[in-house]
Amino acid sequence: MKKWLPFAIILPALAACGSDEATETQAQDLSEASWDDIVSEAEGKEIGMYMWGGDEGVNQYMDDFVKPRLEEEYDITFNRYPMDAPDFLNRLMTEKEAGQTEGGADLLWINAENFRTAKENDLLYGDFAGTLPNLQEYIGTDVPFVNYDTGTPIEGHEAPWGNVQFTFQVNPDMVDEIPESLDDLMQWSIDNPGLFTYPNVNDFTGNTFIRHVMYHVADDPADLAEYDEEWLENNGDDVWESLRSFKESLWREGETYPETSEQLDQMFANGEVAFAMGFNEHRDIGMIEDGIFPENTKTISLEPGSIGNTHYLSVPFNTQEPEAALVAINFMLSPEAQIKKLDPAMWGEGHVLDADTLTEEQQAEAEELTGPAVVEQDEMLPELDARYFDWVIEHWEREIVQ
C-alpha cells in the first residue's frame, strides 16, 4: 500500500526562457483574481491528473468520491492518468524543451525529490497556493510543511494533500515481546534470525528505515534539521555500523532484500517475516479488511520517534485549465474531502488540516474513522532534507550489501 511516489531521476536543468516568464505572469494574474471569478471560469472544464495508480484504495477515492463531487459541485470533468513521477517528469521535460504550451495534464501528485526536480527545472505553474481559500482557512501558512518539502522551499508551487507517519506492523503470534525502540528491534532480530528485514533503499520505505537509523544515531534530532555534510562525515560510519551489527540476522542473512515495500508486505502476509513497515499509521486497517495482513496485526512506532511525511498537489507549467486545476485542489483540501480520505474503506491516510479549525462534528467524524492516535505529536520527527535520500542510496550498497 505504498502511497508515495518513487524517487525522480535527476534531470538536467533548463535555462529560463520566455515561456517561464509567461507562466509566472499567468500565475500572478490568477493570484490577483477573485476566487468567485476562478470558480466561474472553471465551470464546464475538463482536467486530467498525473498520479501514481498502484493502490486500489487511492484509485477508489479519486474515482468514486473526488470525480463525482467535482462534477456535481463545480461542473468539472476529472480524469485520472496513472503514471509514476519519473515518467511524467520526463514527459514534462520533453514538452518544455519542445516549447509545448498545451500539456496533457493539469494536476500532479508530487513530493520530495520529485518536487525539487520539477521546481529546479521550471516544470511547475508557479505560485498558486496562496490563492486557495481552504489552505488559508483550514491549514494555515505558518505550518512547516506548507513552506518546505524535505528541505526545498515550496514558495506556493504546491499545496499539501496528506500527512502520514512511518510505522511498523507486527505479527504478535511471532513476537512475544513487542519492541519499543530501534535498539530493541535490532536485538530482537539478532535473537530471532531470519524474521526481520527492510526493503532495498531505492524503495522509499527502505530508504526511510535508514533515515530512522540516522535519527537513532544522532545525539539530538535537531542535528538533522538541515542538510549537514559535516554531520555525515562525523557520524556516517556509526549509521552503517548500526546496520551491520544485525545484518546477518536479517531474512536470508542480509544477502538480499525485498525490492519494494509491496514485496515486504506480501512476505509479512505469508508469515515469512514478523514485521512490515511503511508510511501511513492506519495502513493496517485496510490490509486486515482486505484479508492481506493477519487479523491481530498491531501497528507501532519505535523510539526515537516516527518520521512524518507530507505529499502534495501541484500544477504543471503547461496546464490548459489552471482555474479548474485550482478549484479541484481547493476541493481536495476541504474538510469534507480530507475527512473522507481518512476512511480506511477507501484511502485511509492522515489529513493536513488544523484540527482547531474543524467543528466538533467534523472532529468526531475524523476520530471515529481513525480511532486513537498511533503516533502522538511529540513522537513525530521531521522528514529529512531530500539530499539525505541521495546519500543513503549512494553509500548503502557499498557499506551494507557488499
Image (tube, grey):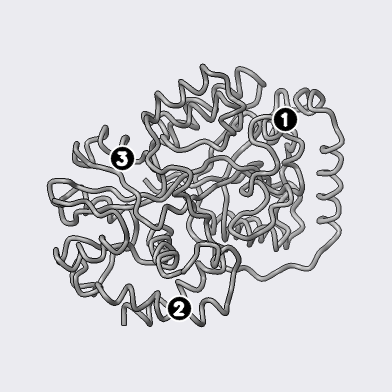
Q: Nearer the viewer, residue 320 or 381?
A: 381
Residue 284's disc number: 3
Residue 375 at x, y percent in the picture: 40, 43
- Residue 250: in sight, yes or no? yes
For mark 2, does the 10 Å Cα neighbourhood hold few (<14), some (14 to 19), or many (20 or more) residues? some
Q: Name the residue at 66% across, 61% down.
A: 94
For mark 1, does the 10 Å Cα neighbourhood hold few (<14), some (14 to 19), or many (20 or more) residues? some
Labels 2 and 1: the sequence-earlier one = 1
Question: Callout 1: helix, strand or loop?
Answer: helix
Q: Name the residue at 22% across, 36% down.
A: 291
Residue 232's disc number: none
Amino acid type at circle 1 is Pro
Residue 245 at x, y percent in the picture: 27, 76
From what the image shows, is residue 284 above or below residue 74?
Answer: below
Residue at image mark 2:
236
From what the image shows, is residue 339 above or below residue 146?
Answer: above
Mark 2 vs mark 3: in front: 2
Q: Nearer the viewer, residue 31 or 165?
A: 165
For mark 3, does the 10 Å Cα neighbourhood hold few (<14), some (14 to 19), or many (20 or more) residues? many
Question: Callout 3: helix, strand or loop?
Answer: helix
Please indicate whether residue 293 sits to the left or right of residue 77 in the image: left
Labels 2 and 3: the sequence-earlier one = 2
Amino acid type at circle 2 is Gly
Residue 133's disc number: 1
Occupied quadrant, residue 257: bottom left
